[in-house]
Each structure stands twice: as C-alpha cells, then as structure tokens.
Image: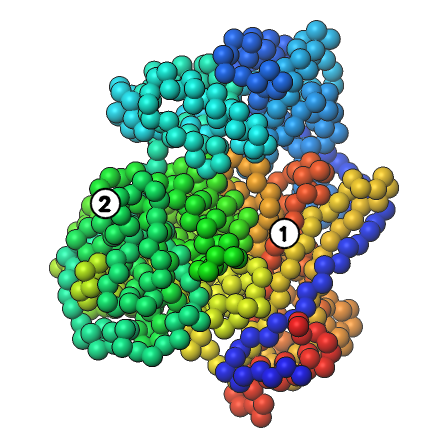
Amino acid sequence: MEHLDESDPFIFVKSITEPRKTIKKPAWPARYERTEYVPIGDDEIEWVSNSMEEQIKSTVSSFEEKKLKDDKRVYLVLGISAQYTINDRYPSRILKYVFYPEILNVLTRLSAEIISYLNDDHTRILISCPLSCLSNFLLKKKYETKYFQNVKRIGPLLPDEQLSSSLFQDKKWLTESTNIVIQLIPNLDSEILKLYSKSMIEYLRKTTDIVEPIFNNNFILTNLGQEQTDDLLRYSNFVFKVSEAPKGMSAGALENAGASFSKLLKTTPSDRPINRSSLPVICILDSGVNDIPPLKGFLVARDGYRQFPNFDDDLGQNGHGTPIAYIAAFGDDPAHPKARIASYKIFSGINRNILFEGYQLAILKYSSSIHPLHSRIFLSSIVFERYNDGITAAIDKLIQENNICAVFSAGNIAPSLVAAYLRDRVPCRDYVHNHPIFDPAQGVNIVAIGSIAKRESDNSVSRKNELSPFTTCGKVNGCLYDCQKPEFVQHGGNLCYDGVRLGMDTFSKTGIPLNTLVGTSFSAPLFANRLAEIFSKCGGKIDNAESLKAVALALSNGEINGCMGFGEVKSLKDFSASLKSIICAEGTIPLPDTISEAHYRTDFRAHISIVIPKFVNSIKLFLVHSDNHFKDAMPHLNTFLKVRAEKTGREHGSVDLGNPDEIDRKTNMKVFKWEFQTQSMEGTWDFYITPEITADMPPEERRATTIRYGCAFLINSKSPVRSTPLTQEINTLNQRMGLVRD
C-alpha cells in the first residue's frame, strides 16, 4: 500500500472513459421553428438584399477577376437560418441546429469543406469549394431548390469583415504605410498555406521590403497603408483578416517606485541552502529578466526573440520582467522559493510593437518534454493595446495543443481614467465593470489574473481583500459564454488618494528592493507561483494542464464573486490535510460518434468512483476542461461538461446537487457541490461526466473533437478532530477498493 505523507493533501484516483452505444432515434417528438439569418454591418446587409442568383453571379465574377487565387478552390461565406427543436415536455432543452439535412445537402452539392466559423452560433461559416461547383449552381439553377431556401448569404468575405476596427484607429494607416498583420485563410493544410504565403510575399515585395511570414505562415507581418490594403483585398482570395500589428504595453504601473524594505534584504535567496534543481520552471514571456543577485541560481535561462540585440530587461526605470520574475519564483514567502525562471523576451521598452511570434517560439521550445528546462507553466504580463481576435485565437490554440498552463495578467485601467475616478471618489466596484480585460487574456485556455489589495492605509482607495482600483473586469467576446474573466485574483497592490502606492515586495532590474509596484502585472506571477507550488507536490502525477487549474480552483473559495472570478488562490501551507482532502482525477472524453455505424450512435462519459468515510459534511468537485476544436475565427468555448452523482444506499441512486444551476452553465471551469444536512455522506460515490456542445457542429467535427479534463474533489471533515487524518483515511479506503491510480 502506498504510503501517504500526512501533510500531503492529494490523492489520485482512476477515471474511466465509458462508451455507450444506443440505437439512433429521436429523443422526443420533434417540433421545429426557424429563425431568420441576421446580417451584420452595412456591407453584409447590402449583399443579402440581393437575390440568391445575383449573389452567386457576383461571387463567381469577383473570383474570376482576382489575381491571387487558388485555381482548385475558392473561399466564401455561407449565412444560414438556424433551426430550433422545441421540446414542450422539457422547455429548457431547446437546441439550436445549423447543420440540418438541407444545409448538409448544400455543402455536399458544393463539394464544400468548412474552414472556419465566423460567429458564436455557427450560422456564418467560411467554406472552401471548387469554383466550378459554384458555377454549376447558376447553370442548373440549383439555388432555386428547397435546399437553398435557408441559405441567405453566399459570397466572398466582405471588406468590413476583413478589416479590423483597430486599423481605423491608427491614423497613420489612413494616409501612409504602417505595420499591419495579414492573416491568411485559417485551418488549412500546411503545404497549401505555404504556397499561399509564398504568393502573398511575392506580391507584397513589389510594394514594400518589410515582409515576414510568422506563426507557421498563417500570418504575414508587413507595411501597408489603407489604399494598398484595399488593393490587396480586391486582388486576393487568400486574405482572411487584416489588422494592426499588435502593440504591447505592460500591465503594471512602474512610476514612483523605489522604496526599500528590510524583509527582503534579510532574506536574500542566494544565501539559502535550497535544492533548486527540484523546483519547477516557470517560463516568463515579458520584457526580459536581468541576472540580479536576488535571482542568483533561480534564473536558469535568458532567452528571447531573435530580433532583440540582447535579452536584458529594458522596460522602464525599474524594469518589468525582472520584478515579475522575483514574484514568480518567491511569491509572498521569500524564505521558501517555489520555482526557477526561464526568461523569454518578447517585448522591449524601445518600441511598442510586441513580437507575438515569440509566444509560439517560447512555448514550442520550453514545453518540449526533451528540453532540460521543460516547463508546464507560462507567464506573461504584457497585454495588447487593442483587441485582436485572430492572434489571440492562435495563441489560445497553441496553449491547448501543447498542454500547458498559461497565466496572463488581465490588464489595467488607464492611469488617467483611474485618476479621474479617484478625483471624483467613485468606488472601485462602480466602475471596474466598464473596463474589460485585455487580449490575449481573453483566450479560453488562458487564465486571466486580476488584482486585489492586500495592503491598506487610512488613505487607501481599497480596503484589504477588495479589488484594486486599477484592475479590469469582464470580456468583450460573447463566444466565451459564461466563462469568468478574470478567473482569479491575487495581490497586485493598492493606491492611496495622496498618490502613495502600496505595492508588491520585489526587486528592480538593478537589484534594488521595491514595494511600490502595482498592477495586474504583479498579480499574475503570484498566481503562477501558486501553480508551481502545486506542481511541486503532485506534478509527477499530473498529465493534463487542466488538473493544475482544477487544484488551483480547489485552493480558492470556489465561489464566483463578480470581478474576483473564483477568488484568491491560497498557498498549500494554509491547507489542512488532516481535516480536508483533495482527490484528483483526469482524462479525456470524445464527443458523440453518430457516423461510424449506420443505425447506432456512441456516446461517451467519464466515470470516477470514490469511497467517502464517515463524518464528512461536504463534497465539492472543481472541474476544468478544454477541447481540440479550433475552427472558430476567435477564441470560442465549444464544449461544456455536465455532472451527475450517484451514491450507495440512496433509494433512487442519483444525488441532488446543492447548486443545480451549475449543470447548464457554458463555461470551462465549474464547481459542483453536494452536502447533506442530516444524512451521512459515507459510501461509494460514482460521478459521471458527460460533454455537451455550445454551438452546432457537423457530425464529422463532433467525432473528431476530444475533451481533456482535470478534476479536484475537495472533501471536508464534519468533525474538527479525527483519529486518522482525513486524507490518510480516504487514501486507505480507496486503495482497498483498487480505485487509487498507480
């Protein structure tokens, strides 16, 4: 039997994926309602006002005139009226369908492939098809068939869909050349994309010398003005979107810094005997990190994007990456470091352009299992000045594919706006909702960290444990549904009405102690430090990055509290393994397979069994997931999970949830609660996790989608004193039943 340290709160149990085959049949008698397709923007409204015949004629004509095109395929947009299935018996089960038989028939007749979804409910889709198939619709008047009655738009991408709104905020672009990013058609085969990129570069080099393909040829960084950009869109069918080259800014206010404090001076890490090689590595993507004495032995790599002359921290008087690195390594407990630091520079104080390909290069390099500084935790406190869905979606995909935890700062409200609120004495809670978090922290798979105050004075704006006056809150992307942004908060400093800053304890880029740095820049590394602490305890047993996030949830209060997300994550040293236990499980679940066999469908669910001892008063399940479906043009929550619990000794088996509304919430982080007021919770509990989709997908895409999940069950003792620590007791019971994972 495995020995468990009494101070270790973690137990790992098995999770089994169970297929369930059923005969295909309607779930209930179907009654359908249709909703009209709603065009967005003047360009699309004008386009759909034409008849289907006129739309197809204009489309064929426009493609024939383009110079940069693929002779085998063209890219166009379908706008589809959705269909609702109404269930009178269960009104809450209203399902929205896009890919019903008529629409699938249109796609088949066009020999079309779905390339990308352009809105949250998948009624606007980008497809590829042979131009000849589209022309045949005109010759044979197939657009008059019943299959086309619910297709309201067919045509090329329109300029107001291709041009980012951020470009029009750049006055330089309106009159002269400026840095832009061209996103080519997404989700294509790498060889096709390489050919498109080559053709595009040859075209652009006739106009500008600044042309660089990045992110696996999916993006091209170049210099164009508005007139040249308009010509590009007119001549090419390869372009998906054109946006301003992302400009970065720090998510921390660095002015008025420089106060020293004795605590850090007395606990300089270089003097402590610590087994540093056993500490996990946090890879920081920021402004560089200087090799200052307090980081000696903990800064294990100084790396960066090739265009930088050096990898020093050159942002501001006190630096940015360097004070962040100290907090990431030492957190709020300088005597007990939790991580080593690999610095990868992606941003410089010399110019505002953020070299966003650095995200890809750093993640691919340091997430590799064969790299000696292999890391599962990546951290960045650089935010985009303006929103950029395409680049954020590319980073989000990269994070999920490489199975890492990415921690980004949520960003700060502009100092001038904060000053105005403070001048008018507006409470923080009354204005933070007006300032959404920044990209790239709006990615589904990115953990965004906001800021709370842990220090206060008589003159401070926020009280202890309240939101910091500068923190941001909420999202602008409706495709995230019920996902919390920010997900968590950590100490990030406070402001006083007289201008004093009550900041974080850290060091400047020259090694000077500081305690006046404030901003979500410094909240994010504290959260990364918490993840490193968790990883040190159980990283060897964790395969899924989602499991780390689930444990972090278990160490927070787990309650959604507005702009605090799920709250502050506490250190493991504050966790009592004698009265509480965390049981971890993880795995993967495929979405239903409805096409492998003619008359059957196969559904999948995860099954976790846990034996619960006497004198337990509550069970909480913290569940985090991601999936590998990436056909949306912006970060998009594609799936959510439902949970059902059964317990031995229950007459009806199933156990009611204490928070039943959680079942249908569309989010990637969930907290389920079970608690008995009078009955015993002792017995074997079976938990069943089933997947759902947020927007309709064709059967082939569902079959190809897999969910990766991590669970953390928090078990609380009813009795304040136990003869055996709760964790040890649960481990023994589950070992006997063969439920503990090897």
Q: Is residue 209 left or right of residue 669?
A: left
Q: Write down the residue under mark 1.
A: 707
Residue at horizontal 76 percent and vertical 69 percent from the top: 653
Q: Image quarter for residue 521?
A: bottom left
Element at badge 2?
Answer: loop
Q: Image quarter for residue 570?
A: bottom left
Where residue 164 sits in the image (x, y, percent)? Answer: 40, 29
Q: Residue 349 bears which disc, if any?
A: 2
Q: Residue furthest bottom?
A: 723
Please report contact status of discs 2 and 1: CB closer than 8 Å, yes or no.
Answer: no
Q: Amino acid at mark 2?
A: Gly
Residue at horizontal 49 percent and vertical 36 percent from the top: 216
Residue at horizontal 53 percent and vertical 57 percent from the top: 369
Element at badge 1?
Answer: strand
Answer yes or no: is residue 314 visible: yes
Answer yes or no: is residue 477 visible: no
Where residue 650 sits in the image (x, y, percent)? Answer: 75, 74
Where residue 163 sits in the image (x, y, percent)? Answer: 41, 25
Where residue 63 sits in the image (x, y, percent)? Answer: 55, 12
* Vertical side of 545 occupied by 608: above or below: below
* Vertical side of 688 occupied by 639: above or below: above
Q: Nearer the viewer, mark 2 or mark 1?
A: 2
Q: Amino acid at mark 1?
A: Ile
> In which quadrant of the rendered image does the C terminus lie?
bottom right
* Vertical side of 615 occupied by 47: above or below: above
Q: Is residue 557 left or right of residue 463?
A: right
